[in-house]
Image (cartoon, grey):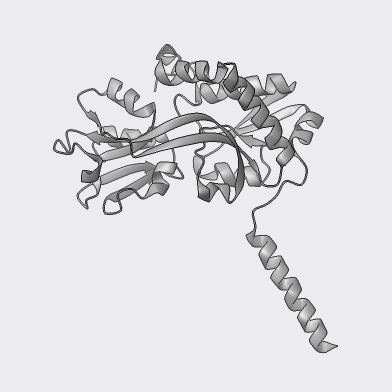
Amino acid sequence: MQRRALLSATLLAATAGLAAALPARAAEPAIARIKATGTLRVGLSTFVPWSFPDKNGQLVGFEIDVATRLARELGVKLEVVPTAWDAIIPSLIAGKYDVVIGGLTVTPERARTVDFTLPYEHSQIYAVVNTKLAPAITAPAQLDSPAVTLALRRGSTAASLNAFPRAHTNYFDDENTQTQEFVNGNATAVLVSTPSPALLAEEHPTLVRILEPPVRQTDEAMAIRKGDPQTREVLDAWIKSRTDDGWLKERFDYWFKGRAWKGLIAAD
């Protein structure tokens, strides 16, 4: 009897440990909660032009357009939950919102903890060099040196790549601080996703050199909690419809290829 009780206790402890190690799964389909409450809660971080406050303090950008139309076509209100980038997935798992719509790149590591929808945008990560600090650097391979200091956004895909392991790396919580460090001359280079390299070059034409080829091509998708096929099916169908009718491309081209929106940016 004592051995049986000990075995039962050991099995219970092992099961509890395994459960703790596994990603949290949706207790109910998020789409059911969305419909029941009449609110779509969207997690995102603010960085231009994905989502950022305009001169009136209202959030605008590509992801805001996507989230707004999705909520409207689901027949619910939109609640945006701005979140620090390195907390974007933990906060989703904790149930603070229903979905991440925020330029989240699909990676195998992230796919172990969340489920991704179909991609709805595609980007490239570029290395951008400060020409005053490193006039001789003209190719990405030259960044892999102890003499190089990289500025990276904490929790970003670029930060996870470890593309230049010999370089010294500083991490920042948001892209604005990251790029300001670069502009101030405290970093040899930054790794940023399109269209940030072009925006930096437009604002600081004598300072910036964009290195070719890109460090990585990426796909971005919405993210939901694990084990929620009903919600993923709804989101996938919406993405496919908005891809097929050209709306996602039109919005992507407006925010990522054009500059008509630049007047919306609030002054520092």
Q: Quadrant of residue 88?
A: top right
Quadrant the C terminus occupies: top left
Residue 66 in view in this figure? yes
Residue at image x 70%, y 71%? 14
Residue at image x 40%, y 14%? 259
Out of 176 and 74, give the one closest to the viewer: 74
Q: How many marks do you count on the picture?
A: 0
Estimate the x, y position of residue 202 in percent, counting from the top left.
Answer: 29, 20
Estimate the x, y position of residue 58 in percent, counting from the top left.
Answer: 55, 19
Residue at image x 71%, y 41%? 229
Task: Indicate left or right for 88 with 3 as reference.
Answer: left
Task: Indicate left or right for 167 with 73 as reference.
Answer: left
Estimate the x, y position of residue 265 in percent, counting from the top left.
Answer: 43, 18
Outermost residue toward the bottom?
2
Outermost residue toward the front?
244
Q: Is residue 145 above or below residue 202?
A: below
Quadrant the N terminus occupies: bottom right
Residue 172 in view in this figure? no
Q: Is residue 152 above or below residue 112?
A: above
Residue at image x 79%, y 78%? 8
Outermost residue toward the left?
136
Q: Quadrant of residue 174?
A: top left
Out of 188 and 157, give the one closest to the viewer: 157
